[in-house]
Amino acid sequence: MTDTTLDTAAPDSAPAASDAVSAPGVSETVQLSNGLSCELPADSPLAKLLKSQRTWVGPSAQERLRILRDAKSIAIVGASPNSTRSSYFVGTYLLQSSDYRVYFVNPNATEILGQKAYPDLASLPEVPDIVDVFRKGSDIPSVVDDVLAVGAKTIWVQLGIWNQEAAEYGESKGLTVVMDRCLKVEHARFHGGLHLLGFDTGVITARKAVR
């Protein structure tokens, strides 16, 4: 789930292959999606295509469950006061269906869902365990820097948003990075609302979700 305004801007597509012209006959190692690699002429169409594919792999389902269970607080960067935006839905869900302390970060808003909105992560009253991000792909590197600056441990980039270089950079700095996944869907999936593959389980319960 992603928004399409500044605070929840439409995600960029997967990173494009470099436009640099390689010298004829020069070969390079290209990593495949299965983790293997091969040598190809650097200027070949296949090499350029493979370089554009996603090769970064984030935390497993079990690791994502642990992240959500261990967390006590979540900051939503790019939160919107607009009730039609995805970030608003996620914020509503977290406030109603979890015990997380939820903070909304948007420099252009003063209040979201009846709670104070903060201009940036540095203004929050605590360091959040998870920073959930609704920003376009090209903004993710700067958000990673902000997350590192405040000392948060996990950045969770919402469904449809992808920046592989930012993910690799964040991990190299010790961050746990989840990308292109909806935190609301993942939380519901792990707590009975959805089957592991994302389907509705049909389970009906009045019990508040267990974190």
Image (cartoon, helix red, strand yellow):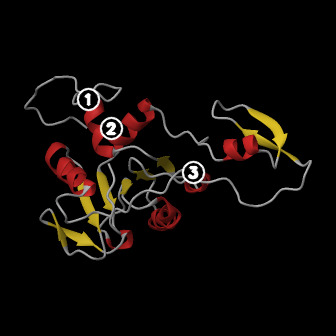
User: Which mark identifies residue 121?
Assistant: none
SS of the residue under disc 3: helix
For residue 62, above or below residue 1: above
Residue, x 90% and y 52% (percent of image)? 24
User: Which mark identifies residue 194?
Assistant: 1
Per the model, the C-alpha gap separating discs 3 and 2 is 20 Å
Residue, x 20% and y 75% (percent of image)? 110
Comes first in the chain, label 3 or label 1? 3
For residue 124, above or below residue 45: below
Q: Position of residue 69 (x, y in %)?
A: 32, 39
Q: Amino acid at mark 1?
A: Leu
Q: Farthest residue to the front: give it.
A: 45
Q: Position of residue 44 (x, y in %)?
A: 79, 45
Dividing the picture into quarters, in which one does residue 49 lie?
Answer: top right
Comes first in the chain, label 2 or label 1? 2
Comes first in the chain, label 3 or label 2? 3
Dividing the picture into quarters, in which one does residue 194 lie?
Answer: top left
Viewer-nearest of labels 3 and 2? 3
Tell which of 70 and 83 is nearer to you. Answer: 83
Q: Check disc 3 and report the residue beneath it.
A: 164
Q: Check disc 2 and report the residue beneath it.
A: 186
SS of the residue under disc 2: helix
Residue, x 25% and y 31% (percent of image)? 191
